Image (cartoon, rainbow, N blue to C red):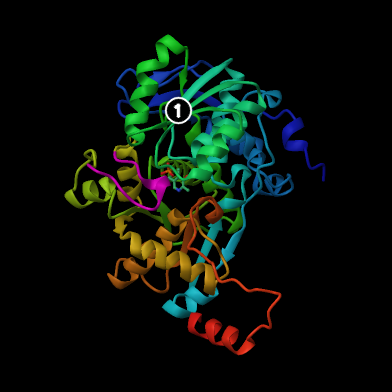
Amino acid sequence: MDHSSNLTTERPTFVTHLECSATGERYEADQLHGLSDAGKPLLVRYDLDGISGAIDKETLAARPPDMWRYREFLPVRSVEHIVSLGEVMTPLVSLPDTEARLGATSVIAKDESRLPTASFKARGLGMAVTMANELGVKRLAMPTNGNAGAALGAYGSRVGMEVYVFCPADTPEVNVREIALQGAQVWRVNGLINDCGKIVGAGKEEMGWFDFSTLKEPYRIEGKKTMGLELAEQLDWDLPDVIFYPTGGGTGIIGMWKAFNELEAMGWISHKPRMVAVQADGCAPIVKAYDDGADHAELWENASTVAAGIRVPAAIGDFLILEAVRDSGGFAIAISDDAIEQAQVTAAQRDGLLMSPEGAATLAGYEKALREGLVDKKDRVVLFNCGHGLKYPMPAADRALDHTQSIDFAALAAAASTDA
Ligand SMILES: *Cc1c(COP(=O)(O)O)cnc(C)c1O
């Protein structure tokens, strides 16, 4: 196999137009777009029969294992515009101890931390920067809780774009430094991500920025869609019963649901999973809207959680998240930071998988859903570990030894056993 063929072979594309997610109004493809005239996200539409005619599952399976193998499902027209940093197909990691502990049939983590910049933001921003590259954008700006800014910094720098990033002052330190090291101009803002977003909105005319805020450009969803296509393919086109997804701006849950609907329309899958939006007790606008039976979420005041990536007090795609959750027969669930931290420790120490707090939130959400009877032990479950645990502050480990003194091994063993 030629391992670069996805990045060198020209393949047919099938975008027909873009569509307002709220009104259905049509917009032309191959032009720069932000939100629709109604102020809502735009969705990319394809000639699905055309895709069906151009590829089949066997052809796909023979391609190199990266997100660009799904080219016919993606918007980029010319292969030379693809901006790639070595995106991998992320592994499905089983959690056997978790299964045994909970009496569950199948619990799998899709470990998105293996992607460039160590989070699944690489999929969305890789695709969005690719399209910005194709459409001639040179200067862009975004608000971020960390990982999106890092991915934008990396992919933007790769093609010489000027990138401005605004993050809450208490964004994990590693993220802020990573963004700067990747060549973006980064500022810490004394507010939350929506306050950062207002700075982008206020400055875009004067600064000539293209606004890369979540869902304010149409292509990030298409990148995140590859998560759903990839999961389907990895499971031999037999999707799990339930997906637990840590939900912030919602690009991933919206993108996966879009993938599943496109695959279903093409006759490639016969059943779709229940989609579960997991949020933290300290920032749960989608859960509240779900519980209230509302179509839109209200701004969450004083948002706070250790899971920085899902600290999103207001999401412009709230109605699309709620639609995916409801149409799939899923639900929205909130868990405490204590439960998140406990789940992180359990997965790391018993299943060997170091999850980010957001990833751990999906495990905690699954356990809570089991307790509440919202899912069954027999359900095949996929959890999303969306970012790398090493990007977050970790519990201290400060035992020390003096090698010039004789070591008291009995004391060492005793300390180890109190830990276990
Ligand atoms: C961005 C992010 C999320 C939330 O993803 P959305 O698709 O925007 O809802 C969750 N976890 C991590 C680590 C993130 O970086």
When the figure is inspected, residue 309 is found, relative to residue 23, above or below; the finding is below
Residue 249 occupies which quadrant of the picture? top left
Residue 274 occupies which quadrant of the picture? bottom left
* Residue at the image point whose x is 44% and y is 60% from the top: 360
Q: Does 172 appear in magenta?
A: no
* Residue at the image point whose x is 47% and y is 59% from the top: 383
Residue farthest to the bottom, as pictured: 410
Residue farthest to the top, as pictured: 206
Q: Which residues are magenta?
A: 301-313
At which x and y percent is residue 25? 35, 21
Query: Could you say which is closer to the camera, residue 41 or residue 329?
Result: 41
Q: Does 305 appear in magenta?
A: yes
Q: Quarter containing ligand 1?
A: top left
Give the side of residue 203 with respect to residue 15, left or right: left
At which x and y percent is residue 151? 56, 36
Residue under pointer 1: 142
Q: Is residue 266 visible?
A: no
At which x and y percent is residue 93? 58, 64
User: Which amino acid is tagged 1?
Assistant: Met
Badge 1 marks a residue whose secondary structure is: strand
